Amino acid sequence: MKKYISFFRLRFSMGLQYRTAALAGIATQFAWGALEVLAFRAFYETDPNSFPMSLSATCTYVWLQQAFLALFAAWLMDNELLESIINGNIAYELCRPVHIYDMWFSKSAANRISRAVLRSVPILLIAAFLPAPYGLSLPAGPGYFLLFLLTLLLGLAVTVSFCMLVHVLAFFTISPRGLQMIFVSAADFFSGGIIPLPFFPPKVQFVLELFPFASMQNVPLRIYSGSMTEPEIVKAFGLQIFWLLLLLAGGRKLCRYGEQKVTIQGG
């Protein structure tokens, strides 16, 4: 375990060094969040009572989404790792006395957390001072805030486990670009990254909430805004744990199989 904690600390420290990139990301994400808020306001002005979430809850959802984008963005994969699989440098990783799945997982989690640490606080502070209902509102209650933090960590773990499948499947492909496009497109849309899941028709929403994508950002962001009932929270929490265990077990097994079948070419 100490080895993987060391990998986590090294990647986390490395991620904190990119402060200029973080400033650019803050500006970009705040601008994008403002555009989303204005777009939702235009829809709510037509008929405020026809939407499943209040405008305040929706705006809070948007700002939390932008603040913690690095935690749940499926497109934020380790391209250096994927490139090492393609060019054969993965041989060096296979020689280390560690399990590469656990090492990759710790590095990926650290990379996401370091980016979120640099970007989340400024975005949340600015959003908190915006006038209601366009700014960041307080959580529905202390209990909801604690559940938000817990499900935020579980959502991060599910996201990393899901993206790890792309890393592992790269063992079996010539190029992982096609896999990235399919996985990223599915995760962005079905996780509520483009449209919050409550805005889908009820039957479609019911099905989507059973998928692993809904266990990513959808659960913590909706819990914070108070748009989930207690039975829905219990169900969503259980699904988060289920998908995390399933994705971890599947990813580990596939990784072991890939290690046995991998062929390194070149000299």
Image (cartoon, helix red, strand yellow):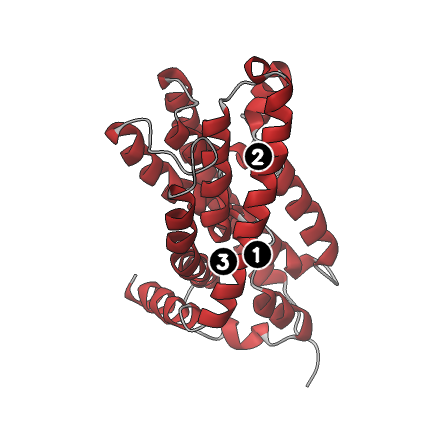
Q: Earlier in the sequence, mark 2 or mark 3?
A: 3
Kind of residue indicated by mark 3: Ile
Work out whether 256 lies above or below 148: below
Kind of residue indicated by mark 1: Thr
Residue 180, position in %: x, y? 67, 53
Residue 177 versus residue 232: which sits nearer the camera?
Answer: 232
What residue would you read off at disc 3? 26
Residue 110 versus residue 81: which sits nearer the camera?
Answer: 110
Helix, strand or loop at label 1? It is helix
What residue would you read off at disc 2? 192
Work out which residue is located at the far left of the displayed protein and give it.
Answer: 142
Work out whether 265 lies above or below 206: below
Measured Cα–Cα span from mark 1 to mark 2: 20 Å
Q: Which residue lies at the image location 48% right of the left edge and 39% below the top edge?
A: 217
Q: Is residue 263 left or right of residue 211?
A: right
Measured Cα–Cα span from mark 3 to mark 1: 5 Å
Residue 169, position in %: x, y? 64, 54
The local crowd at label 2, few if under 14, some if 14 to 19, many if 20 or more residues have their Cα within 10 Å, is many
In the picture, residue 143 is in which quadrant? top left
Q: Is residue 254 left or right of residue 186?
A: left
Q: Which residue lies at the image location 41% right of the left edge and 38% below the top edge?
A: 136
